[in-house]
Amino acid sequence: MVEQFESSTDVTVALPRVRERIPTVVVDDAHVIYRVHKGAAGGSSPVAALRRMVTRTSAPNIREVHAVKGVSFTAYRGEAIGLIGSNGSGKSTLLRAIAGLLPVNRGAVYTQGQPSLLGVNAALLNDLSGERNVTLGCLAMGMSPEEVQRQIPEIIEFSGINQRGDFASLPMRTYSSGMAARLRFSIAAAKKHDVLLIDEALATGDKGFRKRSEQRVRELRESAGTVFLVSHQLSSIRDTCERTIWLESGVLRMDGATDEVLRAYEAFANGK
């Protein structure tokens, strides 16, 4: 397809159509600050609390943590974006802010539709079977009962939880943490998302599952969604994401092509 461009000399020039870049997430100078209880002795007693109310002073055992510091970037439809950084660098906090689970104290976060956050602590009901959790999870994502029935066998097969027996019929409390994490990812990945946020959910399971999940991330991206992937396994970032954002101590250190950003991050990590 081409668009026609009318020049000032009345000569018609054929220009190739440029693929439109549609923003799905805009993070504009976002700051996230939360309070942490330090556990100082006596600071939480009723008498101490009353004294603080009268004197209008804050509790001595509470400190503020500035987890995300003025981060700005725009994500576009069809991108898979890695999010890397040292422990405590603000990666998970940023994902939770994008998902709307944490408020930003300054700046703003704009998203297209409702982002879906998939993490290792995503809620599943321990007393229900894996298959029942698949049903409830798919219904919660807006699938029709007919769609759910079609998806259940594929989701269970993708997760691999039945490789050593019929675990799909057993309560979730009998699952290992890796099995539960694989099932969470398999449920979330069964639906196309405008924005899917994955926090360390690909770090579990064997090599075969990691390969399947990485391929699924690529399929989600190609179906016009946007995927964010937090992982300490840089090989997963390298194999899955063409763009990577590096956070360090809450500050955006680098945003660019994955290979370039990973080289800089590895040099930084090795120089510590």
Image (cartoon, rainbow, N blue to C red):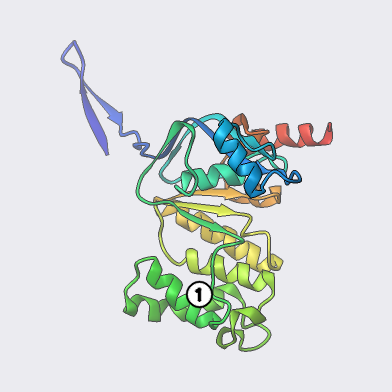
Residue positioned 61% across, 85% down in the render: 167
- Look at the numbered disc 1 and give the secondary structure of its residue: helix
The residue tagged 1 is: 155
Residue type beneath disc 1:
Ile
Q: Position of residue 33 (x, y in %)?
A: 57, 36
Q: Is residue 163 above or below residue 214?
A: below
Residue 71 in sight in this render: yes
What is the quadrant of the N terminus in the image? top left
Assess disc 1: are there few (<14), some (14-19) or many (≥20) residues with their C-alpha within 10 Å of its C-alpha: many
The image shows residue 79 at horizontal and vertical percentages of 47, 44
Give 245 or 224, whichever is nearer the viewer. Answer: 245
Q: Residue at x 56, y 35 (%)?
A: 54
Q: Residue at 65% across / 52% down in the picture? A: 236
Query: Considering depth in this image, is 190 or 69 the residue closer to the camera?
Result: 69
Q: Is residue 22 left or right of residue 127?
A: left
| Quadrant for the C terminus in the image | top right
Q: Depth check: 98 or 235 in front?
A: 98
